[in-house]
Amino acid sequence: MKRTVYGMLSLILSTMVLISCGGDDEKVEKPSGLQETLVLRSSSLTEGSEVDASSTTVITLNYNTLVTVSPDARITLNGQSVAARKNSITSMAIDIPVSLESGTSYTLIVPSGSVLAQNDANQTAPAYTLNFTTRKTGEQALPNNDAMALTRKLGFGWNLGNHFDSHNNGEKVPESWGSWWDKATPTEALYQSLAAAGVKTVRIPVTWGPWEGEASTYLIESDYMSLVKQNVLWAKAAGLNVVLNTHHDEYWQDAYSAASNSETNEEIKVRIVATWKQIAEAFKEEGEYLILESFNELNHNWASPTGGELTIMNEWNQIVVNTIRETGGNNATRWISVPSYQASPAYALDSRFTIPNDKANKLIIAVHCYDPYNFTLAENLTSTWGSTADKKAITDLLNKLKEKYIDQNIPCYLGEFGCSRHETDKENACREYYLEYFCRAAHFAGLSACLWDNFNPGNGSEHHSYFSHNDGSWMDGSEKLVKKMIDALTLSDEKYTLESIVMK
């Protein structure tokens, strides 16, 4: 009842003010409480930030619903009219292309009514003013936005690879812990050791399918859920962030078959919802340290997609986001990570990849990078890396991710990166050079990254061993290398440039 009375008083008072101050202007505005119902959630630039003139070509404003630009918009930058358009990735944002000069102060003014609700033109966004400056020529810095804040929080990450993601052609491995692919029994000490070493985030890849019952409930075995949850809670107790996903469930998450058969697609979607509803319910009261990640590397024998798989990827990511949000609790607002097809940077940069709609506006783009494959993962590893072309390929790729996501205030992280241990000391010196350079390039691109570790010591393809999966002790003499990677990814030192990195 009080709301009704206050609302009527507000309407009467607003009308009186408009009548008394209107003068010759016959245009009567609606009360702001009725007209300006849109909410600006975030901007790709923050108030008072300093940015790079050459790389800042668009300012993105993110709203709380689907929006469009009014044909009567009068948006200005330092008093000059600038155009605005709908964002190419999400319909809940607008882009304002800008051409900036270095060493200059700017004021962006977006008047009230310039941005409209897509489905109701009577709903308009309130006015917004942004003040920022550009750095002088030669200076470099990362954007000061929400995406970068999350990057700093996630820091250097590590994967508990080939443990909970193991299975035998879709069947669960025997109950004995020694039968897991990594032949390990993780303990609380593992996560304490990771934190002590400087790791900030642990990604726990989990394959759920072999431990699920029959359709349509696909009930996950309680003992298995408890084992996964125990590891998540150990990581939490150590002060780590956690990323939890569906990993090698690709054997039933067949995007290729779903793209060509609608019935198959519907069957898979039922299982996706059932699986994620159980995971989300089990963890919905956990805090924001926990990030849920929809998929791993959905692919069809690593062949180039026909196109339909990309559409399916978008559809399935949306389903997972919806399912997690609907469980409520902290899941209503926690960060959710969504990968591109194959978790490939190339497909994350492809215009056919779309970010799901999310009322909470808390999504992270996940990509994996093992470039160049022949040096990092191939069965017959090439022995050298480090030419000008090699390094340019890495920096170009990571900077494209920065430009498309981080600079536009969309979080993006490298869920996996790494390089197999090579045979000779000379080759491994090249490997260490690659890993440090990669991490430093990721730092300059504003990306956090999780190192792949499958607890497979020794040399050759798919040998990635840094920490014991049992207690977190150092493996393969990797302590100095890991600390070097952590510094490369996280240190803000102007003298620590890509050019300063040399092969030992």
Image: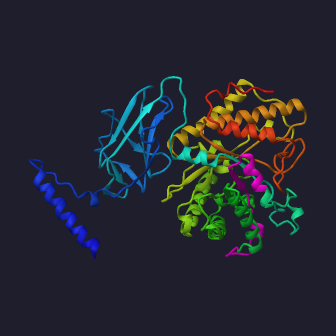
Q: Is residue 137 above or below residue 417?
A: above
Between 423 and 311, the one lying in front of the other is 423
Residue at image location 58% in from the left, 65% down from the top:
324
Please state, as top left, top right, bottom left or bottom right, where the N terminus lies in the image: bottom left
Q: Is residue 196 magenta?
A: yes
User: Is 487 on the left or on the right of 75, as rendered?
Assistant: right
Q: Quadrant of residue 241?
A: bottom right
Q: Please report the bounds of the magenta region as a residue range.
A: 190-218
User: Is 144 on the left or on the right of 286, as rendered?
Assistant: left
Q: Quadrant of residue 294?
A: bottom right
Residue at image location 60% in from the left, 48% down from the top:
153
User: Is 24 on the left or on the right of 224, as rendered?
Assistant: left
Residue at image location 50% in from the left, 31% down from the top:
52
Which color mode does the image show?
rainbow
Q: Is residue 318 above or below residue 73?
A: below
Is residue 245 among the parts visible in the rendering? no
Please state, as top left, top right, bottom left or bottom right, where the C terminus lies in the image: top right
Q: Residue furthest front?
A: 196
Between 181 and 243, the one lying in front of the other is 243
Is residue 66 among the parts visible in the rendering? yes
Q: Where residue 319 sits in the image (x, y, percent)? A: 58, 63
Q: Where residue 288 sits in the image (x, y, percent)? A: 59, 59
Q: Where residue 254 sits in the image (x, y, percent)? A: 70, 59
Q: Where residue 306 sits in the image (x, y, percent)? A: 65, 49
Between 108 and 122, the one lying in front of the other is 108
